[in-house]
Amino acid sequence: MNSFDEMLLANGEVREPYARFHEWFREQDTEALGEKAGEAEAFFRRTGITFNVYGQDEAAERLIPFDLVPRIMAKAEWDNLADGIEQRVVALNAFLDDLYHDQEIIKAGILPERLIAGNEAFLPQMQGFRPPGGVYTHIIGTDIVRCAENEFYVLEDNARTPSGVSYMIENRETMMQMFPELFAQNRVRPVESYPHHLRRSLAAVAPPACEGTPTIAVLTPGIYNSAFFEHAFLADQMGVELIEGSDVSLIDGRIQMRTTEGYKPIDVIYRRVDDDFLDPKVFNPASMLGIPGIMEVYKNGGITIANAPGTGISDDKAIYSYMPEIVEFYTGEKAKLQNVPTWRCAEDDSLKYVLEHLEELVVKEVHGSGGYGMLVGPTSTREEREIFAEKLKKRPSNYIAQPTLALSTVPILVDGGLAPRHVDLRPFVLVSDKVRIIPGGLTRVALKEGSLVVNSSQGGGTKDTWVLRD
Amino acid sequence: MALLGRTANGLFWMFRYIERAENTARLLDAGQRISLTNLSAEPDEWQSVLVSAGVEAAYNAKYDTHDPETVIDFMLCDRDNPSSVRASLETARTNGRMVRTALTREVWEAVNESWLVIQRRLSGRISPRELPAVIDLVKRQGALIRGAFQTTMLRNEIFDFCNLGAFIERADNTARILDVKYWLLLPEHSQVGSALDDFQWRSILRSVSAHRSYAWEYDGEYRAVNIIDFLMLNRRMPRSLAYCYTFIEESLKYLDRNYETRQPCFETAASLNERLSGSSVRQIIDGGLHEFLESFIRDNNRLAQEIGQNYRFYPGA
């Protein structure tokens, strides 16, 4: 497969955004750079920037490999993307509001009702309720892939609980420490103000019961969660409390945290606990991670939950396939960013096509994430495809399929110098009184030659992502 | 900003375990010294190391000999022994991770790095020959953590809860060391003054890293009354009970002032401190050294629990 390389064109020319970097790189001793890479790893290890891999020994904290060649975007490239992303997140919030109220989009015959009814990510408890500020998904991590100079696709919207923003910030921090001269030569837009923007965004959607400056807290499932580092990092950087379910109680109609001085009400909670575990009184009664009664307090205006429960419905991959229509329905404009063509296996014609073309397609579960439970056709074995076909036939509506995209590549540092590897991009977006998009994001890179799977749980690494000022 | 009860608890235990890791290392150092003299007769020196650390029962459940290598392994590397150096640091680090938002980057990194380095060093058995270098490593890492703590942390309630953990643990440790060896310090025994006793006394001092400072504070001779005074009542000696209680009382006073309350645990600490300043060595010996230490250890523990209750360390409080 011929892929678009973001640094080097097919004729060997260096693309403009990488010009200065490339010049710098040519003067470097690659062996010394290799040592720098070792330094970066030691830095991550000491700082504890690790993640836990599910299903492995609790003590097994792993590092996400960091590659020190940055991914660089020109101003114009970024501005176009940002424009498209803003349009999309505005549409997503309007869509969620509609789904939980009048369902105009279904009445208009654009979205089939069966995608909502019986979908476990749709929460009937949210029907008729409008969260403070009318915002449903406050924090979004739009996954974007590139296939050519001017060809970008949105792969997933991640309107539920996107993670990885701490790596965006720490990667930059690491690069600035290791190669300060690069930042003198290139005008790179900063990303470290993200926690500040996050705090502002959250404070701007305080609930009616809030008096004075809103008290904000980050809710984590605890230190064994794979993203615990990020939860602690964000709480720390925002200067707010990092709480677990056992730290709070429902007192006087408010969710209050147990402090050394007594109980204090929380106004806005940035929860990194899934819907199902959020409130054992309303959802999974066995949940030990949640806060009993929080839904009732929420509905009475006693707390803001970010992201709102029930936003997961828009992460459903079958619903994703309607995003161009959704964007148009709520904004009145054509979608500025393209969707990846998607076959919904629930539809007979599509299922037939997918079964016949498994070796070319990527098949995903509609509720899946993290690269689990999917089939990458071109790299699969015949046996894997046969097993998968059986699963598909059993529950077609549980799957969608997409063509295997020729993801763009960006070079990584290897022993002999540079070598191209496939990447994707997750910019982080905040929605509140206004939309805030941080210039950059997390670039994930498949470290294995030819591999298209960039997920950190599957051996992917990350890169610092630069958006140039000019 | 408010401090969560759970965070206060995590800070408290993080520092207890940092302190414990070092104390365990020091006990082993002293044990090794004595066993090298071949003077030790009754009771077995390695056994008293286990008793001082409060892990004798756990050890006996697992082993029936007291050979040095096994004891050293149990005290240094064994993850089943919650007071082993390795397990202590792991607990300290787990707590540190949980309360990371309350720590400066320097303190967190010092704790995390100590855990990384020591865990790697203690991943296999340590021979008696390697012991001095390992003990040195543990002490050095402890010093790094404390250095980062003293020079970067804001002097607020977080600082106080850390100190409370460290000094409660230290007081407990010093009291236990004395209690295991108290019979050596009793009048009928202390008059003997044999070479063996000299060595034992020096080892007590060594186990609290104080064999040099003792000589500075008192004349060079080892005398029971002086050793008792030094480890229990001397407020200049950083591991004495009185020194620890100066800080415990002070930390609780700061907390009260900060929160504008008066918690019962402050009264408890003040009265324990009073007991130390109101006693002379003579009185303590006449009243029964063992009894005094035993009740001190119990009361010190009770104070720790009371602090946890007063400051809502656990749910339901």
Image (cartoon, rainbow, N blue to C red):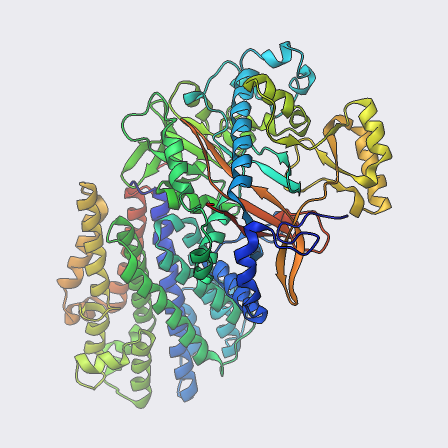
Relative to A448, is B78 on the left or the right?
Answer: left
Which of B134 and B141 lies nearest the eye of the viewer?
A: B141
In this rendering, the count of numbered labels is 0
From the top left corner, tell me how far across and down residue A279 is, in percent: 50, 28
Q: Quadrant of residue A415?
A: bottom right
The residue located at (28%, 25%) in the rendering is: A211
Q: Quadrant of the C terminus of chain B?
A: top left
From the top left corner, tell me how far across and down residue A149 is, in percent: 64, 42
The residue located at (49%, 53%) in the rendering is: A171
Q: Quadrant of residue A123?
A: top right
Relative to A469, is A410 on the left or the right?
Answer: right
- Above or below, comparing residue B42 to residue A245 in the picture: below
From the top left corner, tell me how far across and down residue A444 is, in percent: 60, 48
Is residue A59 at all visible to an observer of this figure?
Answer: no
Q: Quadrant of the N terminus of chain B?
A: top left
- Above or below, comparing residue A265 to residue B287 in the picture: above
The residue located at (41%, 71%) in the rendering is: B138
Which of B170 and A432 lies nearest the eye of the viewer?
A: A432
From the top left corner, tell me how far across and down residue B159 is, in percent: 28, 54
The residue located at (44%, 46%) in the rendering is: A189
Identify the residue at the far bottom of this view: B195
Is residue B102 at all visible to an observer of this figure?
Answer: yes
Which of A159 and A425 lies nearest the eye of the viewer?
A: A425
